[in-house]
Image (cartoon, rainbow, N blue to C red):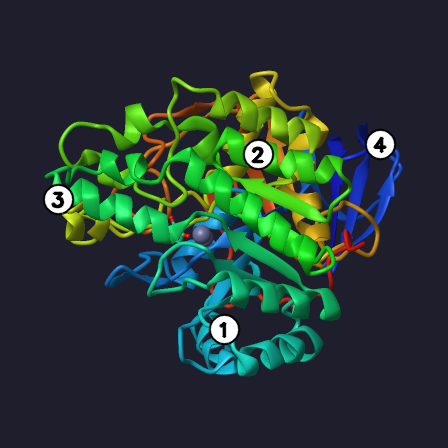
Amino acid sequence: MSLLITGGTVVGPSGSYPADVLVEGEKIAALFVPGGGPDGVETVDATGKYVIPGGIDAHTHMELPFGGTNASDTFDTGTRAAAFGGTTTIIDFAVQRTGEVVQDGLAAWHAKAEGNCHVDYAFHMILGGVDDDSLKAMDQLVTDEGISSFKLFMAYPGVFYSDDGQILRAMQKARDNGAMIMMHAENGIAIDVLVQQALSRGETDPVHHGLTRPEAMEAEATHRAIRLAEVAQDCPLYIVHLSASQALEQVAAARDAGRNVFAETCPQYLYLTLEDQLGAPGFEGAKWVCSTPLRSGKEHHHRDLWKGLRSNDLAIVSTDHCPFCFKDQKELGLGDFSKIPNGIGGVEHRVDLVYQGVVDGKLSLERWVETISTTPARMFGLYPRKGVIAPGSDADIVLYDPAGRTRISVETHHMNMDHSAYEGYEIAGKVDTVISRGTVVVAGGAYHGRRGHGRYLPRGLSSYLV
Ligand code: DUC
Ligand code: ZN
Ligand code: ZN
C-alpha cells in the first residue's frame, strides 16, 4: 500500500525543509518537492506539521522485576503507550540475573516481548554477573543475537552490582568485539552505608532516597567508569540516566579529550526536582523515587543538562521508563524509603517533553529530532533503518503539530500506572499522527495499531565506534 504525506516540514538533524514523503509498504520510498509526488495515491495532509522520524526510546524496562515487584507496564501496555507518544521503537533491557546463564535471561525477555509489542523493539543486555561464561556470551550476543550493548551496575550491591574488576573485564571484552558498555554510574557500596545511617536516624521518608545518593557519588562513579574504560583501551562507554552537573563535567572532560564516551539524560532530570517532587509531603514523594535520583532545583543541574544536550555532551534523551503503581507497589516502602521500588514511567511523554525544550528556547528543532530519534538509532546500531526520513528507511514517521497542545495526566495517559510523574504539565505541541513501518497506528487521538505488529530488531554495532 502507498501513502503520500503532503504539505509538511521534514525535520532531521541537518535541517528542516518542506517535502512530501512517499511511503510504499513498510518503507519510505521517496521525498518530493511539495506537490511533486504521484497522483492516485492515498494522502495524509501534514500541512502545518513537522514530519519527523519516529521516536526511539533507548532505555525502557517493561515488566522489570525490581524490589520485590515488577514494573507495571507489560510489553503490550508499554509499547502501546509509546506509540501514542510518538515513539515507534524501544530498546528494552533484557536481564541476566546473577548466577543465570546469559542466554536464558535473553530467552525469557524474548518470551515476554514476542507477539505483544505494538511498535518495534530491540534489547540491550544487563549483565548481573561478569564471569568467564558471561564474557563468552557477550561475543555470542553481538555476533548472533543482534545485541551490541551491555549494561553494568556500579550501584545495587547484592542485586545487579559489578565490582571494578568485573567491569574492567567486560570493558576489555567490549573493546574486542565492538560492543558498547552502558553504565549505571553510582557508588552503590558507599550509598548503602549512607542509606543505613539515615534509616538508623529515623529518616525514612522518600526524600532521603535522594539525600543518600548525593551528586558526588554519581560523579565519582562516572569518573571511575571513564578511567576503567581508558584502561580497557578506550572501550566505548555510555553513561545512562545522567542526572548531575558534576557527572556531566566528567563526561564533558572525557569527550574534550577525544574519548569514546557518551551519555544520556532523561526528562525527569530536565524537569523535576528533589524539593518539589521527591520532597512532596508525607509518602507522596515515592512516586518520584528513581535512581539516579532527582536533583536539587537550588543547584544548576537542570540548566546544565539542557546545555549538555545542546553541546552534545549529552547525546540522547531516553526515559528509563520503569513504572510502578503507587498503590501496593510504591507502598512497599512505607516507613522505609530503601524499600520503594525505583522507577518513573514516562515512555509516552518523552517526545513531547523534549519538544517543550524547543518551545522554551533551550533546544533547536533539529536537535530535538536528533536527541530523540537519530542519535539513538546511530548510537545503538539501528541507523539508517530507523532514525531518519530517507528513501529505504523504515516508514516510522510522526506528524507533530506545533499548534496543538498536550496536557499530561493520569486521566488521559495510556501507561499502566495509577499516577503520572508529570501530572498537569502542559506541552505547547502535540503528537498528531504516528506511522509504524507504513501502518498508521495513531491518528486524531484514536488508536489503530495492534498488539503483535511490533517486531524484534537485531542491531549492528554503534555508528559512533572509533
Ligand atoms: N533505576 C531506576 O530508577 N529503575 C530501574 C533501574 C535503575 O537503574
Ligand atoms: Zn540504571
Ligand atoms: Zn534503567
Q: Percent position (x, y) of residue 293?
A: 37, 39
Name the residue that disc number 3 marks. Answer: 200
Above or below — where is 100 with respect to 418? below
Q: Percent position (x, y) of residue 377?
A: 69, 52
Q: Which of marks 2 and 1 precedes in the sequence?
A: 1
Counting other residues with Cα less than 10 Å from the Cα at mark 3, is it few (<14), some (14-19), or many (20 or more)? few
Which disc is residue 34 wearing?
A: 4
Q: Which of marks 1 and 4 precedes in the sequence?
A: 4
Which disc is residue 41 wearing?
A: none
Residue type at mark 1: give it: Glu
Distance of label 4 from label 1 (alpha carbons): 39 Å
> For residue 97, what is the image quadrant?
bottom left
Quick check: marks 3 and 2 in contact, CB under 8 Å?
A: no
Residue type at mark 4: give it: Pro
Task: Residue 453: tell me if it is visible.
Answer: no
Name the residue that disc number 2 marks. Answer: 248
Which disc is residue 114 wearing?
A: 1
